[in-house]
Amino acid sequence: MERMGMVIGIVPEKIGEYKALHAAVWPRVLATLAAANVRNYSIFLREPENLLFGYWEYHGSDFDADMRAVAEDPETQRWWTFCGPCQRPLASRAEGEHWATMEPVFHVD
């Protein structure tokens, strides 16, 4: 299992919309994430900086293949058409990233 953290900005005027979307995530989107071995997924909001912090645990053995499967799912692609305009990717993200990945520094159970 690999713990993964990521960060992205959020458009301040879209915070309410983003919260509403995530209060009722579409079942197919959740099923696609589960099939891609994503567990314990949480998103946190930090205001007034308007940052979203995402955390999940990856339980698979081929992260790239699992993320391709998520990206190829039509319902997930449709979901992203609603979420994407709410998000503001960081200028410092790596090439090809939407959410900027973070380096794990500390963990305790």
Image (spheres, helix red, strand yellow):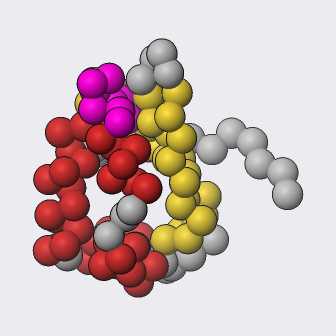
Q: How many marks?
A: 0
Along the viewing direction, whichever of 18 and 65 lies nearer the viewer: 18
Residue 46 in the image: x percent, y percent?
A: 52, 27
Look at the image and tell me whether residue 90 can be seen: no
Residue pictured at 30% horizontal, 41% vertical:
17
Query: Is 101 a magenta residue?
Result: no
Residue extending farthest right: 109
The quadrant the N terminus occupies is bottom right
59 vs 99: above or below: below
* Magenta part of the chain: 8-16
**Residue 3 placement: quadrant:** bottom right
Residue pictured at 48% horizontal, 16% vertical:
48
Query: Is 10 a magenta residue?
Result: yes
Look at the image and tell me whether residue 9 can be seen: yes
Residue extending farthest top: 48
Residue 108 in the image: x percent, y percent?
A: 84, 51
Residue 77 in the image: x percent, y percent?
A: 16, 64
Along the viewing direction, whichever of 74 and 62 lies nearer the viewer: 74
68 vs 99: above or below: below
Along the viewing direction, whichever of 68 and 34 lies nearer the viewer: 34
The reply, left or right, for residue 85 in relation to residue 94 is: left
Residue 62 in the image: x percent, y percent?
A: 42, 77
Residue pictured at 33% horizontal, 43% vertical:
18
74 vs 95: above or below: below
The reply, left or right, for residue 80 in relation to residue 31 is: left
Residue pictured at 32% horizontal, 23% vertical:
12
The quadrant the C terminus occupies is bottom right
